[in-house]
């Protein structure tokens, strides 16, 4: 039996950082695509591109769309699509890093929904994380801050809806194939997000097509980076590095749009990141990712490998 050489110890870190940088780049491409196209159209193409990526995976794994929990798929799609609309709105109304940060509050909401809906324990770690996150939000939403605005509130709401969507995924994962879950989301989201285009469709120009394809490319690259990282390290180690997207988004925002955060904003950002890491380290939850991403799918063998790593 031939033994495979173990991966480099730091390889998974590079994959996780590649994923984080890709998600930040995807947010910037969404902003650029929205200059020419209506937001509803950008949302549709993001979902439709995800569907095109998922269909070959579904065929390869011989996965059926048969389900006994269609209402939960509808809830997951409704919450996820709402989060996506709100997140894209925040991207166009806030500094890039702030929009990403507000959406990355989703792990805190996941912890809350898991306690209320899934009857998980209200642990001390979750209480501490909630307290720290409230301090961070108070710093971010102080009356003199630019987040104290409609885009800021909607960006925070995107984190709440993303948390609800991911909690629903957790509920579905007990009985449904993971590929089935994400394909149903892509199908329902593509169908619903196509409706607004009946009144406001605008054929993308060459530049807009380029940005839309870049959104799909960076989104897919971000998911691949996470998958590769999960193959080489426990989820509890990979998850905290997901917040490095904020650093990449901050750099992109600075060089592209001269966006500079203030000290109170940085302090609030640090609180949100710390709270998210506390939740992630308590139990194996996926790394933070925007709702416009396609959730990472681990095969059965990769899932077993994760158990061994944990």
Image (cartoon, helix red, strand yellow):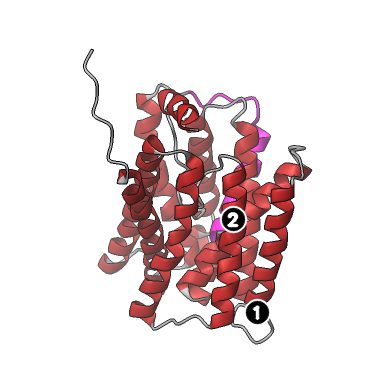
| Apparent side of residue 273 relative to residue 227 in the rendered image (left or right) | right
User: What label does residue 81 carry, if any?
Assistant: none
Rendered view: 197 above or below 94: above
Is residue 271 in view?
yes
Instruction: Point out the residue furthest to the bottom here.
Output: 144
Q: Where residue 237 appears, x then y in whole percent?
A: 47, 45
> 6 or 101: which is nearer to us?
6
For disc 1, the marked residue is 148
User: What label does residue 276 carry, if any?
Assistant: 2
Rendered view: 200 above or below 260: above
Rendered view: 134 above or below 70: below
Q: Main secondary structure of the magenta part?
A: helix
- Residue at image position (65%, 54%) is 108
Please rate how many residues cluster around mark 2, counting C-alpha atoms within 10 Å: few if below 14, some from 14 to 19, many from 20: many
Q: Is residue 128 magenta?
A: no
Secondary structure under the numbered disc 1 in the rendered image: loop
**How far is mark 1 from mark 2, CA to CA?**
22 Å
- Residue at image position (62%, 27%) is 174
Instruction: Point out the residue furthest to the front here.
Output: 9
Secondary structure under the numbered disc 2 in the rendered image: helix
Q: Where residue 4 appears, x then y in whole percent?
A: 24, 25
Q: Is residue 80 magenta?
A: yes
Please state the extent of the stretch shown in magenta in the rendering: 64-86
- Residue at image position (36%, 54%) is 17
Is residue 78 in view?
no
């Amino acid at each position: 039996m031939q033994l495979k050489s173990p991966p480099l110890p730091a390889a998974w870190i590079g994959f996780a950082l590649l994923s984080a940088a890709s998600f930040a780049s995807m947010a910037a491409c969404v902003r650029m695509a929205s200059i020419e196209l209506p937001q509803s159209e950008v949302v549709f193409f993001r979902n439709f591109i995800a569907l095109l990526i998922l269909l070959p995976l579904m065929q390869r794994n011989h996965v059926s769309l048969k389900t006994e929990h269609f209402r939960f798929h509808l809830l997951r799609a409704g919450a996820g699509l709402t989060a996506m609309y709100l997140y894209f709105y925040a991207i166009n109304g806030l500094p890039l890093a702030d929009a990403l940060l507000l959406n990355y509050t989703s792990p805190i909401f996941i912890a809350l929904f898991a306690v209320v809906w899934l009857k998980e324990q209200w642990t001390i770690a979750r209480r501490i994380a909630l307290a720290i996150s409230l301090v961070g939000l108070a710093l971010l939403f102080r009356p003199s801050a630019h987040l104290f605005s409609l885009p800021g509130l909607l960006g925070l709401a995107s984190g709440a809806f993303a948390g609800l969507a991911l909690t629903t995924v957790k509920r579905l994962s007990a009985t449904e194939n993971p590929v089935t879950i994400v394909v149903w989301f892509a199908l329902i989201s593509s169908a619903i997000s196509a409706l607004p285009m009946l009144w406001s469709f605008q054929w993308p120009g060459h530049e807009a097509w380029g940005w839309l394809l870049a959104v799909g490319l960076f989104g897919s690259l971000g998911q691949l980076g996470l998958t590769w990282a999960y193959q080489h390290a426990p989820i509890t180690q990979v998850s905290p590095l997901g917040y490095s997207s904020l650093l990449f988004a901050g750099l992109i925002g600075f060089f592209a749009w001269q966006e500079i955060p203030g000290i109170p904003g940085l302090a609030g950002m640090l609180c949100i990141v710390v709270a998210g890491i506390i939740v992630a380290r308590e139990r194996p939850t996926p790394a933070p990712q925007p709702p416009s991403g396609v959730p990472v799918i681990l095969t059965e063998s990769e899932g077993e490998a994760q158990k061994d790593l944990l």
